[in-house]
Image (spheres, helix red, strand yellow):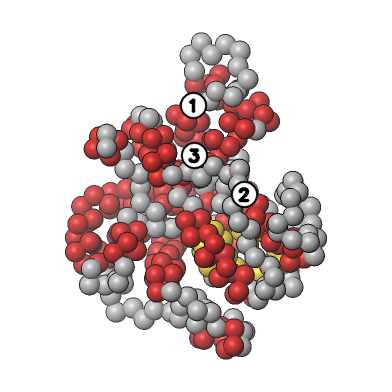
Amino acid sequence: MAQNKRAGRARTATVLNLRRPLGSMSARRGSALLPSVLTFAVIVASGGLLLMIEKGMLNGMDPPAPRGSARHAEHAGLPRRHELAVDTDFQILQEIRNRTIRTMCGQKNMPRGVWSLSPLQRKTLLQHILVNDEHRFLYCYVPKVACSNWKRVLKVLSGALRSVDVNIKMNHKSDLVFLADLEPEQIEHRLRTYFKFMFVREPMERLLSAYRNKFGEIEAYQRRYGVEIVKRYRKNAGRTAGDDVTFAEFLRYLVDEDAERMNEHWMPVYNLCQPCAVSYDFVGSYEHLQRDASYVLRRVMAPPQVHFPERQAWYRPISAETLQYYLCGVPGALLRDLLPKYILDFSLFAYPLPNTTHEACTR
């Protein structure tokens, strides 16, 4: 355990220290490498990619077939008529994520498979991977990354729900098959042969979404977590219903929590889905949800009438300005203490670390 913690701290320090001296140099090299300036801006913000660029790991590498190409389709057992058309930026971002994950996960002390995880890590993972045997895919769900809508899709595909647009309260357990429900040999077979995917979201935006939803709207979370947070971090708290937790208090609570035992709504994606232990075929993003979800549905050959649900009318999206407002209200020292908990989510999935400099917060 102590060895793993030391290794984790070393990885965190490496990623955090890489961003500062290399940004401008990487940007100069990038214009000759990639066609999209916007895509490259995402790439250089990733600690994992900066490491790869600095060490020349991208130079002279033969890229694997893009997801959905004929070569990939044949490898997956699909006929050529199921080749999928995807745009260049889509392929580039997927390749960046794939290579970053492979490089970061290739480091010493990273897990090499599901059975190399600790019992607690494996339990969490298997409880978050949903199974569809008819279309032969596994989906690792991440709370606050459109997982309710993906569960609707799975229920439609299994025949338990007539349409994704049916207006019912989502039951997150019924009519769903989890990898944890299966025997070890069944688990191994599906991990080896099924199409595996997950979806990710900018880490701080996901935390803000969880904070606003759970502490602003859900009384059970206010009683279970809010009361504890207020009593723990607020002087002279007195009686509280737990509905007035500040964002800074919530983040302080996360700093003090064990990442492997957190509530799933704010547990790091790395701990939920273990991308080093499971070789995911596709990592979609919340930022390109409809595009990426449509790709997955085509890839698993879902019936044409099955579509990914549109965003609910009542949903309050988090804008970049809203996120910046909340982050700028958090003490810098607190953010520095929090980042190591989520650094692998930033680095593996090519998200920039938050910018809370004086200039960024006074624009």
Q: Residue at x 51, y 55 (%)?
A: 286
- The residue pinned by badge 2 equals 312
Looking at marks 3 and 2 on the same chain, the residue that comes earlier in the sequence is marked by 3
For label 3, the residue is 208
Image location of residue 69, percent across then percent down: 50, 82
Spatial distance from mark 1 to mark 2, Cα to Cα? 26 Å
Viewer-proximal residue among 342 and 73: 73
Amino acid under disc 1: Thr
Kind of residue at badge 3? Leu
Closer to us: 218 or 53? 218
Contact between marks 1 and 2 (CB within 8 A): the answer is no
Q: Which mark is residue 246?
A: 1
Viewport quadrant of the C terminus:
top left
Q: Name the residue rendered at 40%, 45% in the picture.
A: 320
As helix, strand or loop, the secondary structure at mark 3 comes to helix
Dot label at residue 338: none
Q: Position of residue 142 (x, y in %)?
A: 58, 52
- Report the front residue among 270 and 226: 226
Label 2 sits on a secondary structure element that is loop
Q: Mark 3 and mark 1: span between their CA atoms? A: 11 Å
The answer to whether 62 appears left or right of 222 in the picture is left
Q: Mark 3, residues whose alpha carbon is within 10 Å: few (<14), some, or many (≥20)?
A: many
Is 130 situated above or below 82?
above
Q: So how many labels did they put on this image?
A: 3
> Tag 1, which secondary structure?
loop
The residue under label 2 is which amino acid type? Gln
Looking at this view, name the residue that lies furthest to the front.
313
